[in-house]
Every structure is written in structure tokens, then in C-alpha cells.
Image (cartoon, helix red, strand yellow):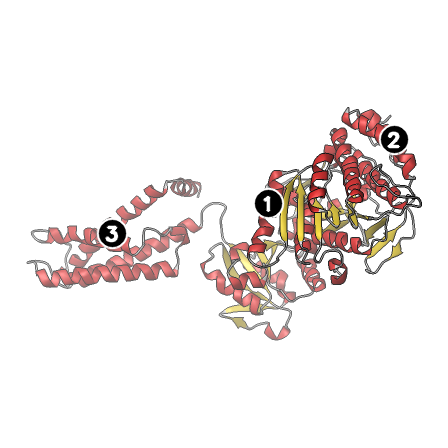
Amino acid sequence: MPQDRHLLRHVLEWPRSAKRLFVVAMDGCMGILAMWLAFSLRLDTLHWPEGLQWPVYAMAPLLAFPILVNQGLYRAIFRYTGVTALITTGKAVAIYGAVLLSILLSVQWEGVPRSVGILQPLILLLMIGTSRALGWHWLRGRPGTAPSRLLIYGAGSAGAQTAAGLGGAHQYLLQGFVDDDAAKAGRSINGTRVYAPQDLPHIIDRLGVTDVLLALPSATRQRRRQIIESLRDLPVRIRTLPGLTDLASGRVTITDFQDLDIEDLLDREPVTANPELLSRNLAGKVIMVTGAGGSIGSELCRQIVQEGPARLLLVDHSEYALYAIHHELQALHDQGVHACELVPLLASVADPRRMADIYHAHCPGSIYHAAAYKHVPMVEANAGEGVLNNVFGTLNMVRMALEYGARHFVLVSTDKAVRPTNIMGASKRVAELVLQAIAASDQPPFDTAVATPPWHCPTRFSMVRFGNVLGSSGSVIPLFRHQITAGGPITVTHPEVTRYFMTIPEAAQLVLQAGAMAEGGDLFLLDMGEPIRIVELARRMVALSGLTVRDEQHPGGDIAIEFTGLRPGEKLYEELLIGDHPLPTAHPRILRAREEHAPWEGMQATLETLRNAALADDTLTIKALLRQLVPGYQPADSTQP
């Protein structure tokens, strides 16, 4: 009823002290009422106190109150109480009853039956217990927080462990288990029935199930995907367990049920790492990661420290991002997870003096250059800063790597560098061209690199190109989740927009392994399977949240999808390869490409002019110069020169 919901909301808004005072006053009144009932039952008539009976009435709440406080009854919150709280209440009232009976037996007031000392605590226990239970049920039904009706998919040890922990979690009502083992169907676990997978549609409808929790830690990725696909058209939200090691250690509780792993949204198996390639250039070395606080950079750092480097240089121009990753890795160091020395360095790769100081002080042997401005509309609106950071920040890093003798340099690139239509993609392609040209040059590229021709590049430069990264900052996954939680709509730029996707760990592993396989001037890319339409990804996320898409065919759906139009510089389709026939590598899912590029000597003058245009933030000139440097660059907006 609306009035009941309004009253409930009003009570929940009370300050904690007011709620506690109300409960104390209610218990005091129940103590007096229980005394009246005890006298009435004992005397077999409706009772009115007289004489020495009045002090006994007054004694009931005055005696009960300090005992109930001492036992912690007023520290509990009604809507979170349960069996444990009722046991505590029984213990407190039992102590109170023993004290009351002792007083009545020793004082022996005239007109006060001794049996009142037994009857009154029993009645009081019944009244307090009933009030707590009614209060709990009333508050439990507060608006918007009805408990989820849960099925656990997996009747093994993980499922049983989870079910055991649901007793105190009132946001979930366990309705049953589901298991692939036909021998378990029809049986029960601690009184909860196990159902067969084929019965799911009927069971979900009959029991009003809202959530299905996957408790399948040992299931293969393929089997998980089959189960998820079978649940996709059912009106339930699919959740998953945290790692069992975290559950067992107590670091994670059942309140940490998670949305599906990002990997579950892919239509392919995640690419596995080659351990030998991962560690080849890392163990015992001084390693630098630029953009260390970003999505890719931070995952690179997490994986690098596991390979036993001597020192890891964390470079980022964002103070908070640098603090966050350094704090995380330092905590692992303090726990003994790794022994790597961590050096946080607040710096911009576009500042040559600062980067020279860092190289001179630490002489890194391997550099993983992930620092870049990557958001297409943002770089399109700030062309000068984008070029200074993406092109000339990379050029600074390359110069220092050569001057200070770094053995390996890996550039993190993007599929938007292939036939780009935006400044971000074009700037990343120029960064690739710089590395390719210097690696192939037979002359020192900078005045500081002294050598006698023929000159051979002492640093193995390589580039890693991949598509969109699921879960990274700016990725559609966090955006879609936020929009679904808010009730929609989900915004997609165009119904035909299609992208390749990979996970953050996949991207970081690819970067590390590519550096180990580099011969100089290599371009690596990942075999990412088939691309995914963004609108299909949105529909999949809506379905796996237990909701339905609202469209012309389903006007009663939950979440609408709106098309907002392509953003400046955005393409419908992205590519990973400019040429044809990529070559295999030591890793079956990593490919090597050799793409045409201009010689370094022919690029220098244009790059210098581009630097001046970027410093002046002259967007039209920047675009014109990028078109000279990058074959295939076609600005998508009307301001192209």
C-alpha cells in the first residue's frame, strides 16, 4: 500500500539515536504490559495494581533495560537481525528473569505472587521476539529492496559453500540448485532441491527466480559459455562467484557476487600466454612502463612484477593514477608476492628534459610505451596536445632509448592506426612509422647517436596493434553497465558499428610476448577472431542482466537502445592490418606484419613542421601534415584541408 511504503520510508530516514530511543521505549512499554498480563493470569482476573504491586511494575523496565543494553540488543539493526539475534534476546531475558525471580523470592512483598517472576519474563520474551520478527519482516520489504530469488548453478562444493553462507544474507532467497549431473537431479542439499538444466525455464517461471549464480570454478570457458547462452533468453540476471581462494580465505563474501566476467562476453576463447616469452626480457632487468596508471599500463605492471625484474619504473603524468598502481603493487611487495623495487615517477613523456633525467638515473633495459591520448573525440577536439603526446612523446622516448642503450622498446598501438579517419589514429600511425623508419635506417637518426656507417639500430623496436580492450577506461562495457543500472537508455553511435575486442590481460600479455619476439621494426597483432557489432554486445549485456531490450517489436521491454550518430573521426569498421599475408610467430595466436614505410631521412623535415603546428594548435595544418605522413588518412569531418 502507498501509505505503508511512505511510513516505511519515513522510519528508515530517522536518525540512529531516534530509532534506538523508539525501540527502548517500546521494550519498556512491553515490560509493563507483560507484568500486567502476568498478574492477570496468576490472579485469574483483569488486574489493576495496588499497594506494593506498583514498585514491581516500575521495577520491570528499570531492571530489564541495563541487562538488555549489556547484551547488545540495541546495537542490532532490525532489518539485519535473524536467528542469532533472537538467541541473544532469549539469553538477555533469561538473565533478567533470574534476577527478577531472585528479588521477588528474597523480598516477599505482600500481594505479589512469586510466580509472577516466572510468568512475566516468559511473556516479555514472547513479546520482544515477536516484535523483532515483525519489525524484521516489515523492514525487509522496504521499497526497491525485495530479496532476490536465487538459483545456484552448480551443486558441487562451491555451490554448497555459497548456500551455507546465504543464511545471514537477507538480500537472497535460495530457491534451489541446478547441476549438469543427472544423478543429482531430484535430490537435495541441506533441504534445498537440485534441478536438471532442462527444467530451468519451468522452474524460473514457477519459483519467480530473479538471479542465477554460476558456482562452477572448474568448468571450462566453453562450458560456461554454453550455460550462459542457454540462460540468455530467460528473464534472470546471471551472476558469478569470486575466486574460491578468496572465498575460502574470508577476503570475499557472498555479498561480492559479481556480474559475469568480461571474457564471457567474447565469442572466442581468451588467448593463453607463453610463460617463456613472458619472462624472457623481464627477469632481473630494469623495466620502464609509461602510462603505468592506465588500463593497459597498470596491467602490464601487474604482470611484469610476477616475472622477477630487479626494478620497475612506473611513469605517468596523472598523480592519482600513478599513486593507485604504486600503492597496489607496493601492497603486494609488502605481502611477499614479489621482490621488485618499485619507483613511481611523475612525468610526461612529452617533456624531454624530465625523461632524460629518468633514463640517466635508471638506464632501463626494456621500455613498454603505453602512454598516449586515446579517446577519439577528445583528441579530435585537442589536436595539438594529441600530436605532441602521441607522436613527439614517442619520439622523445625513442631518442632516450637509443642514447642510453635500452635493448628493447615496445610501442602499444591501436587498430585505429590502420587507414585512420581521426587524428588519434593518424598520430598513432605516425608513432609506428617513426619506429619502423628508425629500425630500418642505416644512419644514426639523432645527432647524439654517434656511429660509423653502416649503422645498426642497437634497440629492438617493435609495435603491438590491437582492437578495443574490454573494461578499459573509455570502453563501452563500463558505460553500458552504468546505463543499464540507471534504467537506460543504452547509447550506441550506429547500428552497424563493429569492433574487435580483447581483454586487458590479453592485451598486456601480447605486449610482453611481442617484445620478446622482436627482431627490430616488427609489427605484431593478435588473431582476435570475428569482430562484434556494438549493438549486439549491448543486447547481450541487457539479456545477461535479466532484462529485455525495449524496441518496436518489444514495446514493454526494460532497456531502450538509442543510436546517437557517429562521433567525429569514428569509423563503422576497424581493421588490424594495412597489408596482406601476416606471418606466424612462436605464439600461435600472435601474427607479425611487415608494412611499408617512408625512410627516416624523408620524415624528419615534415615531423619538425608538424611539431610547430602542434605547438600552435593549428588543426588544419596538423591534418594536412598527417595526410603527408600517413597514406590512407582521410579526415572524416568537413574541416579537412
Q: Is residue 55 above or below residue 416?
A: below
Residue 513 seen in this snapshot:
yes
Depth check: give the residue in front, 627 or 404.
404
Q: Residue at x 24, y 55 (%)?
A: 67
Please rate how many residues cluster around mark 1, counting C-alpha atoms within 10 Å: few if below 14, some from 14 to 19, many from 20.
some
Asked whether the residues under the numbered discs 2 and 3 touch, taking CB atoms below 8 Å apart as contact, a structural biologist would say no
The answer to whether 565 appears left or right of 172 in the picture is right
Residue holding disc 3: 30
Q: Nearer the viewer, mark 2 or mark 3?
A: 2
Image quadrant where one finds the N terminus: top left
Q: Nearer the viewer, mark 1 or mark 3?
A: 1
Locate residue 402, reporting x and y percent: 80, 44
Asked whether the residues under the numbered discs 2 and 1 touch, taking CB atoms below 8 Å apart as contact, a structural biologist would say no
Q: CA distance from mark 2 to mark 3?
A: 89 Å
Q: Is tag 1's residue or tag 3's residue first in the polypeptide sequence?
A: 3
Q: CA distance from mark 1 to mark 3?
A: 54 Å
Residue holding disc 1: 324
Residue 122 seen in this snapshot:
no
Residue 206, quarter of the rendered image: bottom right
Locate residue 520, reporting x and y percent: 86, 50
Q: CA distance from mark 2 to mark 1?
A: 39 Å
Residue 269, quarter of the rendered image: bottom right
Q: Which kind of residue does numbered mark 3 sit on?
A: Met
Q: Residue at x 8, y 60 (%)?
A: 107
Depth check: give the residue in front, 11 or 360.
360
Please rate how many residues cluster around mark 3, counting C-alpha atoms within 10 Å: few if below 14, some from 14 to 19, many from 20.
many
Residue holding disc 2: 606
The answer to whether 22 appears left or right of 207 in the picture is left
Of helix, strand and loop, which one carries label 1? helix
